[in-house]
Image: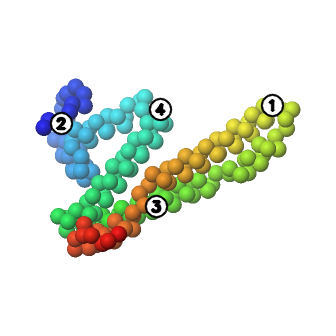
Amino acid sequence: MARPEIGPKTEVRLPDDVVTTIDADAARQHISRAEWLRRAALHYLPHRALDPRHLVTDALIETDTWLADTREWALDPDESAGERAARGAAYAQCVSQMRDAIRQARDSIRVQELSEEYAQAPADDRAEWGRRWGRASGADMAAKILDALLLTLPLDGTRVETRSRLDDPLMDLGD
């Protein structure tokens, strides 16, 4: 079964040492050379670099892919026990650090304080009322987005790490 085309074929000539470096990094990321080159090209396109939606989307996709791949490697019975344990620990640490960072960011948003400032805005000063409303609404929306982002993170960080250390990481533990 042939892989679907992503777009037109584009050829480029690169020095041998650059190709070697690309191949090594692609292998480290467990992606093809073509995928590595696509990601590099997309990363440096000006319209994407100027649009924060692409940066956030790309970062989320890359993080999700890394987490899924690392989880899969951590639970692959064909990998060595040491490699599985290292991948399991990396997976658990990444999930934990991401949760902590998102919680800290969410908790640093002054939602309540800005809501109270908005409630006390002078009704006769429409410009000030609008500024306070904007700050309060923006803070509330940012906190909700971070809460939603927390919900997208895997819940199984320590469980994957524990399973990765078993002789058979896929054995039924009755859980």
Residue in the foreground of this view, choosing between 124 and 173: 173
Q: How far apart are marks 2 and 4 (CA)?
A: 31 Å
Residue identifier under label 3: 97
Q: Distance between the residues labelled 4 and 3?
A: 27 Å
Q: Classify mark 1: helix, strand or loop.
A: helix
> Could you say where residue 99 lies in the image, as x and y percent from the top left?
49, 59
- Of pointers 2 and 4, the one earlier in the residue sequence: 2
Q: How crowded is mark 1: few (under 14 residues within 10 Å), some or many (20 or more)?
A: few
Q: Distance between the residues labelled 3 and 2?
A: 36 Å
Identified by mark 1, the residue type is Arg
Residue identifier under label 2: 3
Q: Classify mark 2: helix, strand or loop.
A: loop
> Could you say where residue 50 lies in the image, as x and y percent from the top left?
47, 32
Mark 4 or 1, closer to the camera: 1
Q: Distance between the residues labelled 4 and 1?
A: 33 Å
- CB-based contact (under 8 Å), mark 4 and mark 3: no
User: Where 79 falls versus 69 (above or below)?
Assistant: below
Q: Quadrant of residue 47?
A: top left
**Which of the numbered marks, if any, corresponds to residue 126?**
1
Residue identifier under label 4: 50
- Of pointers 1 and 3, the one earlier in the residue sequence: 3
> Could you say where residue 130 lies in the image, as x and y percent from the top left?
75, 34
Q: Classify mark 4: helix, strand or loop.
A: loop
Q: How crowded is mark 3: few (under 14 residues within 10 Å), some or many (20 or more)?
A: few
Q: Classify mark 3: helix, strand or loop.
A: helix
Which quadrant is home to the N terminus?
top left
Count the marks.
4
- Of pointers 4 and 1, the one earlier in the residue sequence: 4
